[in-house]
Amino acid sequence: MTDTISLGLYDEFRERHGAYIDHVAKVVDKGFDLNKQISSFHERLILICLGTIGLSITALTAFIPKIPGATFPRHTYIWYIVPAWILLFVSITYSRAVMGTLVLANSGLLEEWKTAAETYNIKQMWLCLIKLSSTAQGTVKTGDQERSASALFAELAERVNKCVPEVDHTKTSSVANRRVRRIKVQSTIAVASMQVGMILLCISAIKLFLSL
């Protein structure tokens, strides 16, 4: 009866642990997908900013010869176009920073999954050795000594159990939270800089049209 209960507990533990590993795998996959979407968004943001800078330079080279020298709007360049370019470069810089932070986040997710998988495999070995220690009979010769098979398997199970990776979940959670906050701040700055830069370029375009 006791053996039946023990086997039932072992099976329940294995089932629950396996479900936990599957859950971690799904969370990691969803995390990779989300990070990929955020990275793709910022890649497009970088392309938009670079394209806008290139188009604005092309437009300026076409407009400058048509503007009379006496009415050349220097303040438009100083107060609108140059700050707009600077803001677009700021957006590019922070978008690149977001992508770099996402690489670190993906590395952290992969490390968490690796640790969870190693823990699962070690626990499976530990369970097998525990079962052997409870069912094995007789003695085993190790070197020049005769030892109880049950005690030997129990000792091996204890050694295997000590190999389980130690994870500081508080530290891991703290690092992940800091990365999330960093990504939010960097993304906000990147998007806001691009929007303000676009507005300044639109204002400068209107002013240049009016000066023709």
Image (spheres, rainbow, N blue to C red):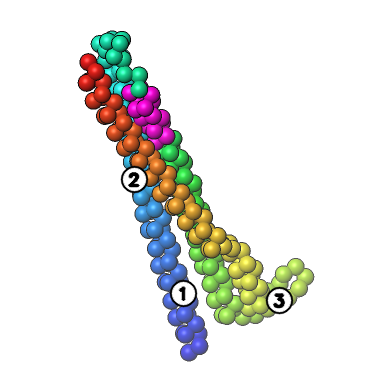
Vertically, is 2 above or below 72?
below
Query: Furthest residue to the right?
Result: 144
Q: Nearer the viewer, mark 1 or mark 2?
A: 2
Residue 162: horizontal and vertical position, in percent?
A: 63, 67
Residue at 40 percent across and 67 percent down: it is 19
Using a 10 Å C-alpha cutoff, classify the residue at mark 2 as few (fewer than 14 neighbours), some (14 to 19) or many (20 or more): few
Which mark identifies residue 13?
A: 1
Residue occupied by mark 3: 147
Mark 1 vs mark 2, CA separation in Å: 36 Å
- Which mark sits nearer the N-terminus, 1 or 3? 1
Q: Nearer the viewer, residue 4 or 42?
A: 42
Using a 10 Å C-alpha cutoff, classify the residue at mark 3 as few (fewer than 14 neighbours), some (14 to 19) or many (20 or more): some
Vertically, is 125 above or below 212?
below
Residue occupied by mark 2: 37
Name which residue type carries label 2.
Gln
**Magenta includes 52?**
no
Q: Are marks 1 and 2 in contact (CB under 8 Å)?
A: no
Q: Nearer the viewer, mark 3 or mark 2?
A: 2
Name which residue type carries label 3.
Arg
